[in-house]
Amino acid sequence: MNRDEPQLTVAEKARVVYYVARMAKRGIADPDRQRGTVDLSDLERGVERVIDGARKREERAAKASK
């Protein structure tokens, strides 16, 4: 794990797994699998939102502990 990445809670991990599973499902349903024409940007943004939320949570926790 990259040092810049925050520790994820169980709920956050579940949300990331959900988004990755949806990406896989879209990839399987792609009629042109060789070229990867399916748009996954909305799901990628979802994963980024989860990670950004975890970063903010860790920052708040760090400020509260000082």
Image: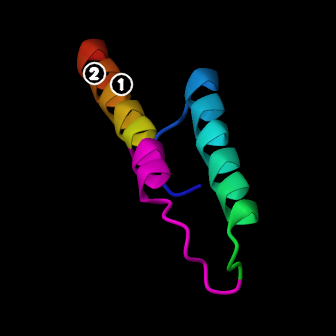
Q: Secondary structure at mark 2?
A: helix
Q: Which residue is mark 2?
A: 60
Stretch in magenta? 34-48
Q: Quadrant of the C terminus?
A: top left
The amino acid sitting under disc 2 is Arg
x and y, in percent, of residue 12 in the image: 55, 29
Taking the spot 46% from the left edge, 54% from the top edge, the residue there is 44
Say if residue 4 shows up in the picture. no
Label 2–label 1 contact, CB within 8 A: yes
Badge 1: few (under 14), some or many (20 or more) residues near its Cα, within 10 Å?
A: some
Q: Please give left or right for residue 20 compared with residue 2 in the image.
A: right
Badge 2: few (under 14), some or many (20 or more) residues near its Cα, within 10 Å?
A: few
x and y, in percent, of residue 40 in the image: 50, 60
Taking the spot 27% from the left edge, 21% from the top edge, the residue there is 60
Dividing the picture into quadrants, the one containing residue 15 is top right
Identify the residue at the far right of this view: 28
The correct choice, above or below, for 45 with respect to 18 in the image is below
The correct choice, above or below, for 45 with respect to 9 in the image is below
Q: Quadrant of the N terminus?
A: bottom right
65, 29: nearer the viewer: 29
Say if residue 21 shows up in the picture. yes
Q: Please give left or right for residue 8 compared with residue 59 in the image.
A: right
Q: Please give left or right for residue 40 compared with residue 33 in the image.
A: left
Taking the spot 23% from the left edge, 21% from the top edge, the residue there is 63
The amino acid sitting under disc 1 is Arg
x and y, in percent, of residue 43 in the image: 49, 49
Whether residue 40 is in magenta: the answer is yes
Q: Which residue is mark 1?
A: 57
Q: CA distance from mark 2 to mark 1?
A: 5 Å
